[in-house]
Each structure stands twice: as structure tokens, then as C-alpha cells.
Amino acid sequence: MGPLAAVERFLERLFERQTARLFKTAIRPIQVQRRLERAMEGSRVRDGSRTLVPYRFTVRLTPDDLAAVRAMAPSLAADLADGALAFARAHGYSLLDRPTVALRPDPSVEVGDIVVDAADPTDRSQAVVAPPGAAAEAGPQPEGADESSPAEPSPAPAPPMGEGTAVFVVPGADGPRATLRETRPDGTTRTIIFDGRPLTIGRAPDNVLVVRDGRASRHHARIDGRRGTLILSDLGSTNGSFVNDRRVDSVALGTGDRIRIGTTSLLIEALGEDVPPDGDTGSGDVRG
């Protein structure tokens, strides 16, 4: 992590803590997701031609904050693991295994703060070859137990290959195909094909969909295919993400919904079986 990025993230954490103290605002699941993603990026390492990121995470919050965020998102650990996998795939990072997230109450953490401990991304002691498919969802937990995802045991390690390096197999698409129509601030349009892989949106050049919009954040929002549903998640943007003129943090999308990112709009023109075959959507496709 560069020095400027470290300072930026320190100030962001300081602001979040002070805001929570002064206004007693509850921690939102998307804030936990963002903190986990920052921990993933902050611990990434180069390994030959690939970039490895952590796949084992422990999220620590005060007992009250943890209880509140669990009430908002009962499947938070599984959702965080799914989000970590989607984030890694969207940025071209490699993992030695499918991500898992454990939630822990910790009285030593300050109110409003979120602490994410990321394991060494190069530690192969617990890694196995990840089979295709999304991260498993946490099953029922014994009363009083810490929540983690996935709940079921990991599959048996694969036979050794080469020097014993475990290989992360990119999971297949987990969501419906969709056709989106982007309308830019200058009025021009283009067709975007969502093929089930995460579609990150923002001004930064590492997004799948780069928007030339001064009111959009560098990493503004993400569209995922999750368990057969199209989901839009705001990534803590400054000006917010809107669906049908309503500000949202995370929402399922359907045909006809209009997403607004800054002054850029995305219309869901077709979804699932209504999406025309490849090559029939016209020019300007982001994905074909």
C-alpha cells in the first residue's frame, strides 16, 4: 500500500469512528464489506505473474455493533465471503482458496470501528484447490458460537501439483445475463452486456465499466449475479447510488429498473431469457 493510500484510509477510518460516536449511526453491512475489501488490497502480494490476496478474514466489532449489523444482515458472514470472492475476480486477483469470513465480538474495539484481520495470502497450510461455484453460505450456528462462512468443512486437498502450489480456479458465472443501456452525461449511449461476472462501476480505470462522470466516485457501485438474482451494491460512494430515483445500499434489480450513478444512467433493458444471443445487441458492447 502506498503512503498516500495509507493516509487516506487512516483518515477515512477516523471519520467513520467520530461520526458513529457523535451521531450514534449504526454500522451498515456495506461498510463492513468496504473495510474487508481494503484489508484485501492492503495485504496483496506479488507471486510471479499474479497478485495474491488473503482468503481468510476475521471481522471484529464491539458486541453491540456486531449484534446490530447481524440484525440487519443475518447472513452477513456468507455475504461478505461472496463479496470478497467477487471483488477478487473483478480486480484480477488470485486466491489460494475460497474466501471465508469469521465475525467476532471484541470489547476492545472502539464503538463504530471495524477491525479486519487478514491472514497471510501466501499461507498454503489451509488452502485447497477451490472448485467452481460461489462461496458457500453459512449454515445454522450453535447458540453462542461465532459466525463464520462457509460453515461446512472444506473439501479434501487436491493432489500435489508442481511445487505444491494450490491453484485458484475462477468460479463460473453465478447470475442471470442482462442487457443494460448506459446513457452518459453528454447524452450518448452504449449497450452493456452483463454475463454473470461482477460489473464494477466508477471513474477509476480498474473498473469494468469506467464512467466519465465527475459526480461518480472512483469505485462507486457493483452489479453482481448472486444466487440467480441481479444485485446492485453501492460501494460507499460520495453521492450515492439510485434505483428508480431512490437511494439504495444494496437492492435486487429487474427489467425496466433505472440505475443512476452521478449523472450517468443504466437502464435494465433485458434480463435472463429475454437477453438476445451474443452479437445481437449492437455496437459498443462492454462485454459480448
Image (cartoon, rainbow, N blue to C red):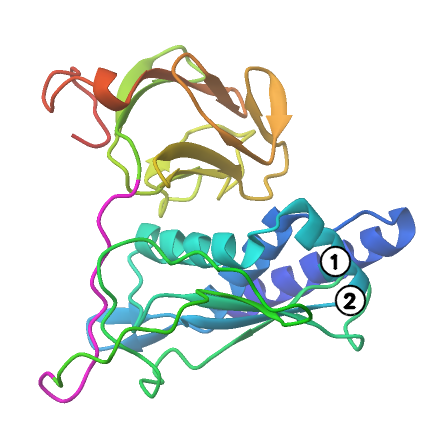
Q: Position of residue 197 (x, y in %)?
A: 29, 42
Number of numbered discs: 2
From what the image shows, is residue 225 above or below residue 73?
Answer: above
From what the image shows, is residue 144 above or below residue 177?
Answer: below
Tag shown at residue 89? none
From what the image shows, is residue 199 above or below residue 71?
Answer: above
Q: Position of residue 251 (x, y in %)?
A: 53, 31
Q: Is residue 5 visible?
A: yes
Residue at the disc numbered 1:
67
- Inspect the image, locate mark 1, and give the three-letter code of the amino acid beneath it: Ala
Q: Toward the viewer: 224 or 13?
A: 224
Residue at the disc numbered 2:
63
Q: Toward the viewer: 55 or 284?
A: 55
Q: Is residue 249 left or right of residue 126?
A: right
Tell me where residue 41 sits by quadrant: bottom left
Q: Main secondary structure of the magenta part?
A: loop
- What are the residue bounds of the magenta stretch? 161-174
Magenta stretch: includes residue 172: yes
Please tell me whether mark 2 sits on a helix, a strand or a loop: helix
- Residue shown at the point (40%, 66%) measured from the top left: 99
